[in-house]
Image: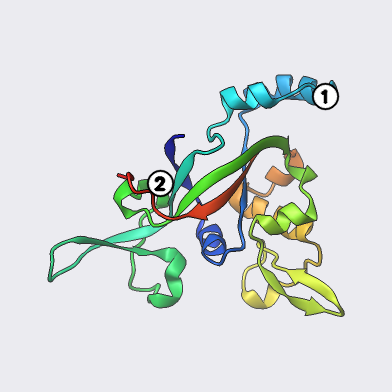
Amino acid sequence: MKTKPILFSTDMVQANLDGRKTNTRRIIDEKHYGFLEYAFKNKKNLVDWISKNAKYQMEDVLWVRETFQQTIMTKSGNKAFLFKADLDLFDPEIVSWSPSIHMPKEAARMFLKILNVRVERVQDISNEDAIAEGIEYIGDIRDSAIFRNYMRPGKEKQFDYGFPHNSFSSLWEKINGKASWKQNPFVWVYEYQIIEKPENFI
């Protein structure tokens, strides 16, 4: 087991905090595509390859890096941190946020334990897994569940995707760019659970 950082967008931090998200998909470097295409075509066992190449392995504990702001507690002089995922608590006009990549380890408040690792094409995601990716449920229309369209600005326009798979594709493009879904890359699929802060962390 190792302890490693992982980046999440503000939307996905909120999904984790809400308990909606237990999967994350990350693009695999194209240098591996030749092997993966061969392995999938010939139904070769990928277990050994995954154990050697996946950035995160089963039982690893990940600490989440998220958009933040560091402050100083005036009375004690100790460092304190604000997080953009808690946006409802702050005035967005007066808070200057720092990118998640710069968040220090000491600010970590969310910890994930990897339960499973596998490989697939991003377009092969099931509706069940799309929901496990944390897509936002909007409500029901005519007995059909409606999920958020992440590529449409303004909440009044974010309810036109009836299928989880489509909602996830819009989330994927928001994070990775408009052409990223069509490219259908191989991805790491990490399944995890949120855990308490490890006693030996830091």
Residue 30, percent across and down?
A: 65, 27
Closer to us: 144 or 111: 111
Closer to us: 40 or 29: 40
Closer to us: 61 or 164: 61
Q: Is residue 193 above or below residue 147?
A: above
Label 1 vs label 2, nearer the camera: 1
Left/right of residue 89 with respect to residue 194 in the rendered view? left
Question: Considering the image in quadrants, where does the C terminus appear?
Answer: top left
What is the CA distance from the residue labelled 1 to the residue labelled 2? Answer: 37 Å
Closer to us: 22 or 148: 22
Identify residue type, mark 2.
Ile
Name the residue located 58 percent from the left edge and 30 percent from the top edge.
Answer: 54
Residue 71, percent across and down?
A: 24, 63
Location of mark 1 (residue)? 43
Q: Is residue 164 above or below residue 54?
A: below
Give neighbour class at mark 2: few <14, some 14-19, many 20+ (Cα, 10 Å).
some
Residue 64, percent across and down?
A: 44, 50
Element marked by disc 2: helix
Identify residue type, mark 1.
Lys
Left/right of residue 65 with respect to residue 127 in the rendered view? left
Element marked by disc 1: loop
Location of mark 2 (residue)? 101
Name the residue located 59 percent from the left edge and 43 percent from the top edge.
Answer: 115
Label placed on residue 107:
none
Q: Is residue 31 above or below residue 76?
A: above
The quarter holding residue 201 reads top left
Left/right of residue 156 with respect to residue 11 in the rendered view? right
Left/right of residue 139 with respect to residue 112 in the rendered view? right
Can residue 187 be seen? no
Name the residue located 65 percent from the left edge and 55 percent from the top edge.
Answer: 133
Residue 118, percent across and down?
A: 68, 36
